[in-house]
Image (cartoon, grey):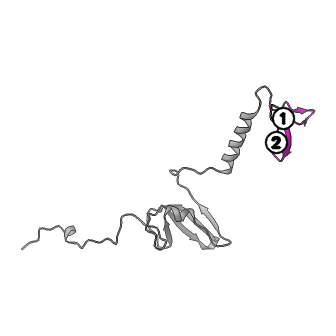
Amino acid sequence: MESRRSPLKSAVPSNVVSPVRRCSRTACGRPAVATLTYVYADSTAVLGPLATYAEPHCYDLCAEHSERLTAPRGWDVVRLTDGSAPARPSGDDLEALANAVREAARPQGRAPGAGAQNGRRTADPMEVARRGHLRALRSPES
């Protein structure tokens, strides 16, 4: 008698193989989002987007473990980003924001170079103290 069952239905079901790659860390079952590779010759750990294929000497990490990744003392960590992930603010972004706030706070009737005389900058009448590029200003009411 011929079996009418398809070969897939006759196969033993398995919960071991998952279509989703999991984090390589012990006891972590979260889905992997990044791949870690060590470049021993350069003492560098490279963390990048999830690799297309699972490689034997690479480690897949979940979001939490990829954020907390540290390298051995003396090693560098290189974090590669893919274009689809939102970029984190950098130091340049913070400086640009500070410059925009300073520009918005500048009095409207005064030109940026109005405090300079004979090539030297004179103290701003509102300025009380200065430390580096930071200034302490007096309240306009006083």
Q: In which image quadrant can residue 102 be found?
A: top right
Question: Does 113 appear above or below 11?
Answer: above
Q: Position of residue 17 (x, y in %)?
A: 34, 70
Label 1 vs 2, first from the N-terminus: 1
Q: Please, which residue is most extreme toward the left here?
A: 1
Q: Is residue 86 left or right of residue 41?
A: left
Q: How many marks overall?
A: 2
Residue range in magenta is 112-135
Near mark 2 (Cα within 10 A), the count class, few <14, some 14-19 or many ≥20, is: few
Q: Position of residue 40 (x, y in %)?
A: 60, 73
Could you tell me which quadrant the N terminus lies in? bottom left
Q: Which residue is found at the position 57% from the left and 58% from the top?
A: 80
Task: Tell me the kind of residue under disc 2.
Answer: Ala
Q: Which residue is found at the position 64% from the left and 71% from the top?
A: 43
Say if the magenta span includes residue 79.
no
Tag on residue 107?
none
**Which residue is the site of mark 1?**
126
**Closest to the observer, 10 or 125:** 125
Q: Is residue 126 left or right of residue 14?
A: right
Q: Which residue is found at the position 66% from the left and 46% from the top?
A: 93
Tag 1 secondary structure: loop
Q: Position of residue 88 (x, y in %)?
A: 59, 51
Tag on residue 136?
2
Say if the magenta span includes residue 129.
yes
